[in-house]
Image: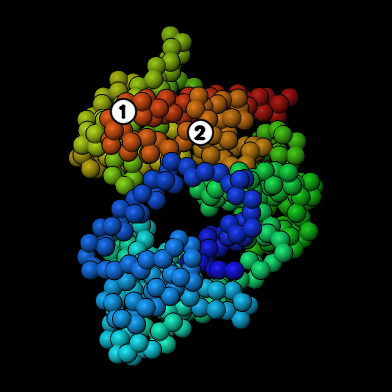
Amino acid sequence: MFLTTELLLQYQRCSRRAFLDIYGDLTQRDPPSDYLLKLIQDSAAHRRTVLTEYAWQQPTWPPRDWIAGGQATLEMMRQGVECIYQGVLLRETPEGVTLVSQPDLLIKQPGQSYFGDWIYVPTEIRLGKRPKLEYQILATFHTYVLAAVQGAWPETSWLILREKGAYEVDLWTLLPQMQTILQECLQTLLAPEAPEVFIARNRCNLCGWLNYCSGVAQAQRHLSLLPGVTASRYTQLQALDLVTVESLASSTPTRLETLPGFGPEVAQRLVWQAQAVLENRAIAYPDKSPSSKPLNLSQELPTAPVELYFDIEAEPDLNVAFLHGVLVVDRRTQQETFHPLLAERPEDEVLVWQQFLELVNDYPDAPIFHFCPYEPQTVARLAKLYDTPSPWVRPLLNRFVDLHERVTRTVILPVESYALKPIARWVGFDWRDAKANGAQAICWYSQWLETGDRAYLDAIVQYNEDDCRATYQIKEWLVGFLQESLCSELV
């Protein structure tokens, strides 16, 4: 078995993914998404930019033939090549596994090694904006394997990041942690079965095994599908033998609230969450709920003559908010009008910002509904960027109503996530393009800028309109549900 740099990276993100990458049925793995392909392309572009600063040579060897790659790299190191690009370093473990390190650069420096009065120092080029621990572990892994190859430890290892530039890794602090991770990785990959499935959306979204693992989790009704069941909380629940939705739903909150990372509110919510999923119904927080303040329905979820539903699409690499989508719902005329305020070029952002201000000022008394804090945060940022007078901005921000906050404060839903799509789909709304999402919109905008094909803009506008309409439908459902719940309490 070969344990490569890529496998070690994936293990840090998910031990099950690393196992499946070796032993899984590759026909069950999804093809990479457009967004993942974009990240790969951006990473390659970043690497090319960095490489222009070095006079490098690259060993040649048949693809995936690590032994041949290691021999070719070793020969270049013996020759004293100043800078080696994507060489292969090999080190055997007592378990009979070959560690394969492939640093982006091996840079020659003075020192004593098997080769003479020089040593090599590894450098890893990564697209990330900050030196994530997983990247530092890889840089330490490179040094660990390199030390065996050249018979000498370099004093440091480097990361070259997109924004931070060169970052020196603290090898001697990280080495024990890297060795622990490496040993755990070896044990996992040599085990007879894959690690237990655990779905964590923020970690799993770009993984090709997501749909496969989600199918396994759904068949098992795995607790990781419940919002609020984090990996650390799941470990605590396992200790109490609460590993099924049924057992958690029938548990008492007092049994959970003393567990580390729980407390009364988390304990109560998790029990309710299990009950909602088990019974496939929404549960309203009772007045005695340990959650935050009760909702003032008329003030915090107003039903107004005109309501605005707002969603922004942005390209983070360009730092541009390129689409302000506003759905105007006029209850007086029973009309719904969608306004896609679109910056066809990044430099048009200021024009779109002005159009947005003009539109919302046409309805000065209309509440502006959105989902999650991103929209008001972006409005505040753009106001500062374009010197919008504060007396204009403060009243505007006061009109914003975050439906995500209202939903999570007042109801428990039988969903796997409290993101917009799962909630909207549960209340009966669906997107015209089922695969469209924020990441895909970023890809579409980049493709529009590259090709000039307006089909990409049309796809973004359709997706954004659906987001606005989903927000509207959630608001309508929530108001109706809470009104019904209040009436039931009065009866």
Tell me which amino acid carries mark 1.
Asp
Image point (27%, 30%), residue name: 452
Mark 1 and mark 2 in contact? Answer it, CB < 8 Å: no
Q: Residue shown at 22%/30% (left/top)?
A: 351
Residue 261 position in % (x across, y down)? 62, 60
Asked whether residue 294 is in view, the answer is no
SS label for mark 1: loop
Residue at image point 76% right, 55% down: 242
Residue 32, percent across and down?
49, 45
- Of mark 1 and mark 2, the one earlier in the sequence is 2
Q: Which is closer to the viewer, label 1 or label 2?
A: 1
Instruction: Give the labeled residue for mark 2.
Output: 435
Judge whether 268 appears above or below 190 on screen. above
In this rendered view, identify the residue nearer to me: 179 or 248.
179
Residue 30, relative to residue 430: is it above or below? below
- Residue assigned mark 1: 453
**Residue 33 shown left or right of residue 75 in the figure:** right
Marks 1 and 2, how far apart at CA? 20 Å
Quarter holding the C terminus is: top right
